[in-house]
Structures are given as structure tokens and as C-alpha cells.
Amino acid sequence: MDQYDYSKLKSCGENVFISGNVEIRRPHLITIGSHIAIDTGFYCTVGAQLGDYIHIGPYTTIIGGAEGFLTMGHFTTIAAGSRLICVSDEHLGAGLVGPTIPDGFKDNLIKKPIFIERFASIGTNCIVYPGVTLAEGSVLGAGSLLNRNTEPWTIYVGMPARAVKHRSQLMKEKAKALGYNL
């Protein structure tokens, strides 16, 4: 199975698998920890900092160009088909829309990083808007749209996502057993 050329990345930890069938537009802006798996079809145009024990499922898209940024803490996941938008046109008519429009003619841009704090997870086919923080241990259920920050250890579902229940924090003990002081 072909793998990505890790030498292109800003830095890369140990026990990392990145499929050879990915497109990372700005690898020099990507820092990757250890115990990472990034599946086929991953498409990324932003800078990113990934902690340890992370899985990014197949056909996940993270967009926003050179001005966008994603941070993923330890023990986080993004499931298949999800879309994270770090930079977006505002779409309120202040200018023309799209990345090929020259400066001075562009719509206003929303440029805000996305933060996925440790133990947080994004389900299959979710959409996350610019500037959102998934708080520690929070979960975004499959097919949901997240346009605001979450509360810690809470499960969210729907379009737009709303809190539906709290989540156990037992996984923190498992992480401590692996040597992580949290």
C-alpha cells in the first residue's frame, strides 16, 4: 500500500500512516504527532497541528487555503466524509465569491481556525464552520452541522447541532495509563 512522502511535512512523529492517495496542498504547514492514521481521499489546503493518537477517516476535506488552520488535540477523530471549513466567503454580497477573485473584488472572508480539543470526535459526513471549537470530550454526531462552540463532554446532533446528552470521562483514565498526564 502506497504511503504519503512524510519528508514534505513540517514535522512528523512515530507510527504514522498517511495514505498515498491524499492531497495535502501545504505540507510545510503541517505538524503531525505520533500514532496517526490518515485515510485515502483526505484533502487539506490549510495548515494544521495534530497531536497524538488521531484518526482522520477517508474522504475528509479541510479547506481554507494558506490562511486557514486546524488544531487537533490528542485522542481525536474525524470520521469519513466530513468537511471542515477554516476560511469561507461571507456570502452577504460585499464582493465576488471564490478563491480566484482578485483582491479588491472579493467578498468578505471569515478566517477563523477550528480547534478540536483532546478526546473530541466528529462523526461521519459532518460539516464544521470556521472558528468553531469542539471542547474536550465533545462529540458531533453523524450528518450534523456545527456552527458554534460545544461544551465539554457533551454529544451534539442535528442541523444545526444541538446538545443531546453528556458523555463519560472514563477515557481520561485510559490516556493516563498510556502515559499522558492530562
Image (cartoon, rainbow, N blue to C red):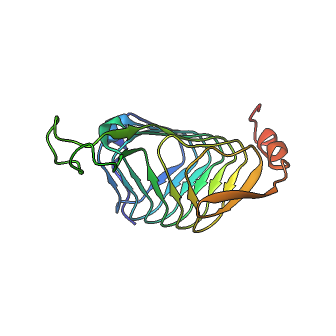
In the image, 112: left or right of 160?
Answer: left
Towards the viewer: 80 or 174: 80
At horizontal 39% and vertical 37% (from top left) the residue drawn is: 111
Q: Residue furthest top?
A: 181
At horizontal 52% and vertical 55% (from top left) the residue drawn is: 37
On the image, the x and y values in percent for residue 174 come to 81, 47
Towards the viewer: 63 or 159: 159
On the image, the x and y values in percent for residue 16 come to 50, 49
Q: Is residue 49 above or below residue 138?
A: above
Q: Is residue 57 above or below residue 28?
A: below
On the image, the x and y values in percent for residue 152 come to 75, 43
Q: Quadrant of the N terminus?
A: bottom left
On the image, the x and y values in percent for residue 79 come to 56, 62
Label tally: 0
Q: Residue furthest front?
A: 93
In the image, 11: left or right of 99?
Answer: right
Towards the viewer: 28 or 142: 142
Towards the viewer: 138 or 31: 138
In terms of image quadrants, where is residue 163?
Answer: bottom right
At horizontal 36% and vertical 62% (from top left) the residue drawn is: 2
In the image, 95: left or right of 52?
Answer: left
Q: Quadrant of the C terminus?
A: top right
At horizontal 58% and vertical 64% (from top left) the residue drawn is: 159
Q: Residue furthest left?
A: 102
